[in-house]
Image (cartoon, rainbow, N blue to C red):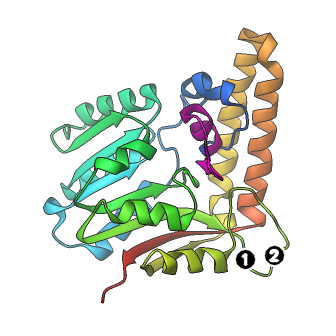
Amino acid sequence: MNSGNKKVSLEESVVTAMDGADKGLFPFLPYILQDLEEIGSDPEMILEIVKKHFSDYPDIRVLDLGCGKGAVSLKLCAALGCRCLGIDAVKEFIERAVRRAEEMNISHLCEFIQGDIREEVHSLRNFDVIILGSIGPVLGDYRTTLESLKKCLSTKGKIIIDDGFISDESSLKHPLIQRKSEIARQITEAGMEVADELLIRGEEIAGSNEDIFKRLVKRCEELMVQYPDKRKMFEDYIKRQEEENEILETKIELSVKVIVPKRD
């Protein structure tokens, strides 16, 4: 994530995307998230969107940025026979994605690499689908993100962004979440437009959020015993998770947008 002109470290960027504040959490993320195969977007939802907007499934090339343990890519490859490249900064997540692809006998369709997506996007080209699944503004604001990713698209390419936004009537201010009108303006300034949008109600994710939260708390409490000197860091992470869940469920709106270049 970019903050003004300052480029933050990879570790800080990843922790921020996971709703953390202390980059010291980075090496502990694989342990904290070990019980979760799906980190970020709902794979089934992304699958339905791809099916809606494409028909030549085996010919599709998908780029899954911040892929986590590969849940979305694995779902797409298994269901559609398309080809996916997943990139994530956490080595253990990539290793898990590779193992799962082997277990599912779809390794020939999936490639997973460890890397900094902020750097990797500069050399990636001709993807039909680019997915940013609930990773926040790792590549910058919407305009910066879309201007970077446009270069990675094929002529028929589409960008799928799973993200939250603040309604223009809300008084909420959040350092990582933008207002609806501001997002719309930046999409236009990037020379792109929203081709489709699926709204997600907060109550729809409340159950899964609660289950995820319980699993995170359990693992953080185990780490507090193993690393008593880092107890406050883990306690703060739990608190932030609780606060972010409340925001996601009650104070912002969630959507999956399909964004495409404007056609002349």
Q: Residues within 10 Å of mark 1 (few under 14, many from 20)?
A: some
Residue pointed to by mark 1: 167
- The answer to which image quadrant residue 215 occupies is top right
Which corner quadrant holds the C terminus? bottom left
- The answer to which image quadrant residue 56 occupies is bottom left
Which SS class for mark 2? Answer: loop
The residue sitting at 72% across, 31% down in the picture is 22
Q: Residue furthest bottom?
A: 264
Picture coordinates of residue 46 (x, y %)?
40, 62
| 6 part of magenta stretch | yes
Residue 174 located left or right of residue 37: right
The segment highlighted magenta reads 1-16
Residue pointed to by mark 2: 170
Picture coordinates of residue 49 (x, y %)?
37, 70
Task: Tell me: residue 239, above or below residue 3.
Answer: above
Residue type pointed to by label 2: Ser
The residue sitting at 75% across, 34% down in the picture is 237
Q: In the rendered image, is residue 235 in sight?
A: yes
Alpha-carbon span between mark 1 and mark 2: 5 Å
Picture coordinates of residue 134 (x, y %)?
54, 54
Which SS class for mark 1? Answer: loop
Q: In the rendered image, is residue 74 in sight?
A: no
Picture coordinates of residue 48 (x, y %)?
36, 68
- Are the two marked residues, 1 and 2, in contact with CB atoms closer than 8 angstroms? yes
Count numbered badges in the picture: 2
